[in-house]
Image (cartoon, coloured by chain):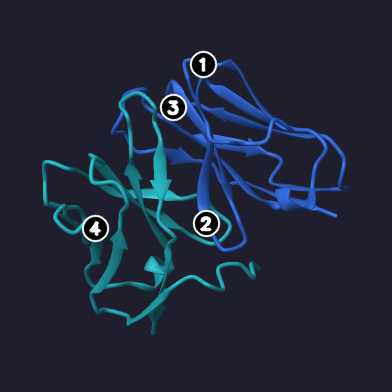
């Protein structure tokens, strides 16, 4: 009964390909996030959604397109993958109000060849 | 295994000793702070939080101290155990309200020595 689950856990693909990462939470939260963690462990927010609406787009290239079909899901599609996209991507969720801790998935390690 | 985090500050402590992990935050208007623990191959896990109207909060074996004057946050772990070995992040909610924007610190790797 994983609270925030992401698939796949590992993704290895060629430069220029298009790929998707899926995220689902069963906590009943209405806010979801995508974070990118680089090789130095630096964790940076990419997007946040509240009730399926985009709240934050943190200057992410438009090759990245999040989609939230419902409050429990936030998927991330990436077009034309580049070497610099190699990282670990984390999905998270929280209760809708500010000042609530986020619950993270275990990450998707994306490696671009 | 991971070969990441080579530039992370590292704190090494003896098992049973107390650990203190420090964090400087960026925004004097931030009103909510969180400490997370990240184990290898896992996502960050919530440890403890504190609101800006407090300067101290205690949990089980952990205490968070907030000094708003110097924009400093610390996490104290009592009687450190091998299972405490991980990377620790502080995070601040930089607002404005309703934007759910959290900025994470650079992280500190805690190594517990047997």
Label disc, if present, on residue A42 of the rendered structure = 2
Vertical placement of A71 versus B25: above or below? above
> Residue at the spot x=47%, y=15% of the render?
A51
> Residue at the spot x=86%, y=47% of the render?
A15
Label 4: which residue?
Answer: B73
Vertical placement of B23 versus A96: above or below? below
> Residue at the spot x=64%, y=70% of the render?
B3
- To which chain does the residue with label 4 belong? B
Q: Answer yes or no: is residue B1 visible.
A: yes
Task: First in sequence, mark 1 or 3: give its number.
Answer: 3
Asked if marks 4 and 1 touch (Cβ < 8 Å), the reply is no
**Secondary element at image label 3:** loop
Task: First in sequence, mark 3 or 2: give its number.
Answer: 3
Asked if marks 2 and 1 touch (Cβ < 8 Å), the reply is no
Q: Are marks 4 and 1 on the same chain?
A: no
- To which chain does the residue with label 2 belong? A
Q: Residue A55: image x %, image y %?
A: 47, 23
- To which chain does the residue with label 3 belong? A
Q: Are marks 3 and 4 on the same chain?
A: no
- Colour of chain A, in one word, is blue
> Residue at the spot x=58%, y=23% of the render?
A73
- Which one is in front, B57 or A80? A80
**Secondary element at image label 1:** strand
Q: Are marks 2 and 1 on the same chain?
A: yes
Label 3: which residue?
Answer: A27
């Amino acid at each position: 009964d994983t609270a925030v689950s992401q698939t796949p856990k590992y993704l290895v693909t060629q430069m220029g390909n298009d790929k998707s990462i899926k995220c689902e939470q069963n906590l009943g939260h209405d806010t979801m996030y995508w974070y990118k963690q680089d090789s130095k462990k630096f964790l940076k927010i990419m997007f946040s959604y509240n009730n399926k609406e985009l709240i934050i787009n943190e200057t992410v290239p438009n090759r990245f397109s999040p989609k939230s079909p419902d409050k429990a899901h936030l998927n991330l599609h990436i077009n034309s993958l580049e070497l610099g996209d190699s990282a670990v991507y984390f999905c998270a969720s929280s209760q809708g109000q500010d000042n609530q801790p986020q619950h993270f998935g275990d990450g998707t390690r994306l490696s671009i060849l | 295994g991971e070969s990441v985090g080579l530039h992370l500050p590292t704190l090494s402590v003896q098992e049973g000793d107390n650990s203190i992990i420090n964090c400087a935050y960026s925004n004097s208007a931030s009103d909510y702070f969180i400490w997370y623990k990240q184990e290898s191959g896992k996502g960050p896990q919530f440890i403890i939080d504190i609101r800006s109207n407090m300067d101290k909060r205690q949990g089980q074996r952990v205490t968070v101290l907030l000094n708003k004057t110097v924009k400093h946050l610390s996490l104290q772990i009592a009687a450190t155990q091998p299972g405490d070995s991980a990377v620790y992040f502080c995070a601040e909610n930089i607002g404005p309200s309703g934007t759910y924007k959290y900025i994470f610190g650079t992280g500190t790797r805690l190594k517990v020595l047997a």
